[in-house]
Amino acid sequence: MIKAIYRIAWKDVAGDLRRRATLSSMLFFAISVLVVFQAAFEPDRKEALRLLPGLLWATSLFTTLVGLGRVFQAEEEDGAFEGLLLAAVPRGVIFFGKWLGNLLLTLLVEFLILPLTMILFNVDAWQHIPAILGILALGTLGLTGLGTLLAAMTRGARSRETLLALLLLPLTAPLLISGVQAVAAILTVDGQVAPWLKLLVIFDGVYLAMTPWAFGWLVEE
């Protein structure tokens, strides 16, 4: 099963890198959002440090939505989704493969936009980059996990991007709040990051335990 998950994920990642579709769209969108925020706020260094957690997570969320809108695009264009479901593997394996491919692309974009954000907003927090990346990765696990399920649910909808956003934002609000507070605690000398990290782990565990089962039920219906 691990091999099947790897093959599905590698198919998505390699196919996207070859077509330059999802990754380029996510990067372009992330950079556009950061430039708009920078032009709108123009904060000083102290204010930028306070705004950084929210800016990072807002950019990450919007960028993730762009990627999730394309999770099943290749199968839809080739009419291969039903064929994928006929593969001799459990439905949860298909879910984890699609989720892993999207997760890798999202993490790559987050890895690139974090230093760009610090440069654009003139924030001196380079020593915290490993910790911030770890928090972003932890939150992205649950965000993309639930998002992949909702992307499958809205796959045939006419306004699927809008519907996907309407479903994902309320359900992941606690995770996003925990992520913002965890990054803020890292940037604050006396901040308590442990409680927020525990919440992130709990949300990740709940989402990733629930979504494979829900995906199997969804595609059967």
Image (spheres, rainbow, N blue to C red):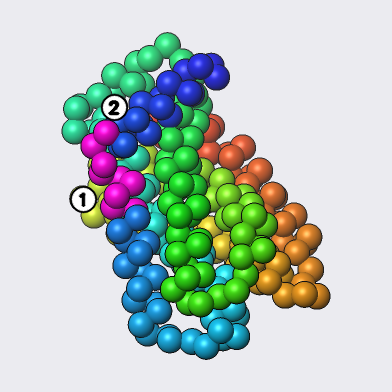
Disc 2 packing (10 Å; few <14; some 14–19; many ≥20)? some
Residue 81's mark? 2
**Type of the residue with mark 1:** Arg
Tell me how far mark 2 sits from mark 1, CA to CA.
17 Å
Characterize the magenta stretch by its predominant secondary structure.
helix
Q: Residue furthest top?
A: 88
**Type of the residue with mark 2:** Phe
From the viewer's perspective, is 15 left or right of 57? left
Q: Are marks 2 and 1 in contact (CB under 8 Å)?
A: no
Going from N to C along the chain, the mark reached first, 2 or 1, is 2
Taking depth in this image into account, of 159 and 122 the one nearest to the observer is 122
Residue found 55% across the figure and 75% down from its top = 123
Residue 8's mark? none
Residue 119: within the magenta? no
The residue where tag 1 is placed is 158
Task: Give the extent of the magenta segment.
Answer: 18-26
Question: Which of the two marks, 2 or 1, is nearer to us in this view?
Answer: 2
Residue found 51% across the figure and 66% down from its top = 56
Question: x and y percent of residue 132 in the render?
Answer: 62, 59
**Above-or-below relation of 53 to 169:** below
